[in-house]
Image (tube, helix red, strand yellow):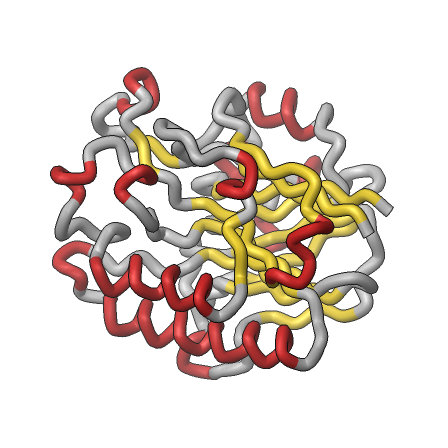
Amino acid sequence: MSIKLVSWNVNGIRAVSKKEEFWTWFENTDADIINFQEVRAEEEKIPKKLLNTEGFSHHFNEAEKKGYSGVGTYTKIEPVNIEKGLGIEELDNEGRVLKIEYPDFILFNIYFPNSGTGAKRLDYKVEFCDALLDIVLELKNSGKNVVITGDYNIAHHPIDVYNPANCEGKSGYLPEERAWLDKLEEAGFVDTFRMFDEGENNFTWWSYRTRARDRNAGWRLDYFYVNEEIKDNVKKAEILDQVFGSDHCPVTLELEF
């Protein structure tokens, strides 16, 4: 069975749903599972058109704070089980995680915390990331297959930012954040995009403030990681940088089981 997954930080689902380019993409996608981050809306305030999508069931985890964070997954494949959050109370009030179990794998749709101006939330972010790593490693070691997607809010290597020297010390490129992705890979998880493309200038986020997308002055912040045991099941992973509507673009993963 072939399964195509998409992940996209939409930077507000109500805002993106007003854009023609979003619907052009959504109504023509061949994805089986679509993961949105930064939904920033309670379910009852999501436009009705996005709650009546033929062929998809939808599942959301929203933040306690209104208009903030939040993730949503649209799926054509019936889930075996759905959980909201990491199961850790102090990390679960911002609506950052959907854990969806399918017959062949467990999917984590995650909007990772931003470490913030002056790294004021770095400790929270590291705690969140370490807790996630414990969870996915336990699943992996128990024989489960794991797919971890979303906006990680981390650019891993110099190749993942347009101007590495200028990015030093900035949120999303801090040594502690990048080291956590090292730990994830050392634990046996694979950055699927880099299985297919080791080239430069592959970005998924561009600042609105500097018209960075026009210059492709971006960062790669959005990923699909899988446990190494299903690396051979990965058939394709792409960045859809010609899809507009947000300051991020979608990323994709195709699996064959």
Q: Residue at x 52, y 32 (%)?
A: 239
Side of 61 where 124 appears, left or right: left
Q: Residue at x 56, y 47 (%)?
A: 192
Work out whether residue 187 or residue 94 is closer to the camera in this orientation and state it. 187
The quadrant in which residue 135 appears is bottom right
The quadrant in which residue 61 appears is bottom right
Work out whether residue 215 or residue 193 is closer to the camera in this orientation and state it. 193
Estimate the x, y position of residue 42 in percent, counting from the top left. 55, 56
Number of numbered discs visible in the structure rendering: 0
Work out whether residue 254 or residue 77 is closer to the camera in this orientation and state it. 254
Asked whether the viewer can see residue 39, the reply is: no
Side of 69 where 86 appears, left or right: right
Q: Residue at x 47, y 42 (%)?
A: 12
Q: Residue at x 14, y 47 (%)?
A: 168
Side of 230 where 124 appears, left or right: left
Asked whether the viewer can see residue 71, the reply is: yes
Estimate the x, y position of residue 161 in percent, counting from the top left. 28, 37
